[in-house]
Image (spheres, rainbow, N blue to C red):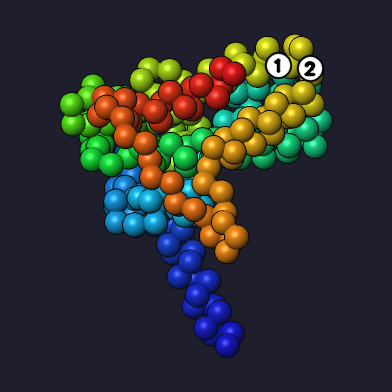
Amino acid sequence: MLRVITTLAVSLLSLASWAADLPPDVLAKNTTQEVLAILRADKDIQSGNVQKIYDLVEAKVLPHFDFNRMTQLAVGKHWNAATPLQKQSLVKEFRALLVRTYSTSLTAFKDQAIEFKPFSMKPDETEVTVQTEVKQPGGKPIPINYDMYKTAFGWKVYDVSIDGVSLVINYRSSFASTIRQSGIDGLISTLESKSRSVEKSEPQPNSGGKAVPVKPARSKPSTSLKSLADRMLYTASR
């Protein structure tokens, strides 16, 4: 038994080391292609099963994001004034809001394709931007860029720019306004409220405990995917 456990541990460490060695553009491309392949193949997700999208995002996307750094940058100068418990709550609620918003928006992905722009970096660089463009039939391409930095556990995303607008900077303005009016605890409460409002728009379980699939509303091709950008930026400005 000890030999089995040791072998498993070594295998997991080797896998983690392999992921840590991936260049940022390759990591982003591999993750994106895997997620999109699952989105297009899973009939439950196509029918609007948000819980399965949550599970997908948790397993495939979140490990490559640094929510601690994202939250710290979004809170800005007020971060140092927060207590350790408040910082923990801020990260938790900001993460929950982004995950819910991102997950529910993924239902808009149907016939779109993601193009990765040419990428190059110096051997000693520790911060880079991976540029992508989402193309959809009959619609204007939407640029989505990922700011990433190198850690001991591989490259991590700490900001996303959608159609030229940084999520971190956009949220920073909203957070600062809330903190001025209600303090850090007020911001935590606001994040909780926003997360609940996103949750209310999701499919609700029926009496059997399963989510009732909701067929995504039809919309013009030019606006279908853009709902991802609009939805994420809208929650920041409310």
Q: Residue at (23%, 22%) from the top-left corner?
A: 140
Residue 167 place in picture, x, y as percent: 49, 23
Kindly identify which numbered label has been placed on residue 122.
none
User: 49 or 236: nearer the eye?
Assistant: 49
Left or right side of 124 for 74 = right
Q: Which residue is mark 1?
A: 178
Query: Hey, what amino acid is under mark 2?
Result: Ser
Vertical arrangement, residue 184 with respect to residue 69, above or below: above
Vertical arrangement, residue 200 with respect to residue 160, above or below: below
Query: Hey, what amino acid is under mark 1?
Result: Thr
**Gap in angstroms between the C-alphas marked 2 and 1:** 6 Å
Residue 223 place in picture, x, y as percent: 31, 25
Residue 26 place in picture, x, y as percent: 30, 44
How many circles with numbers are drawn on the protein? 2
User: 99 or 203: nearer the eye?
Assistant: 203
Q: Residue at (56%, 17%) from the top-left corner?
A: 237
Kindly identify which numbered label has been placed on residue 182.
2
Labels 2 & 1 near each other (Cβ < 8 A): yes
Q: Residue furthest front?
A: 207
Q: Please, what secondary structure does the residue beneath circle 2 have?
A: helix
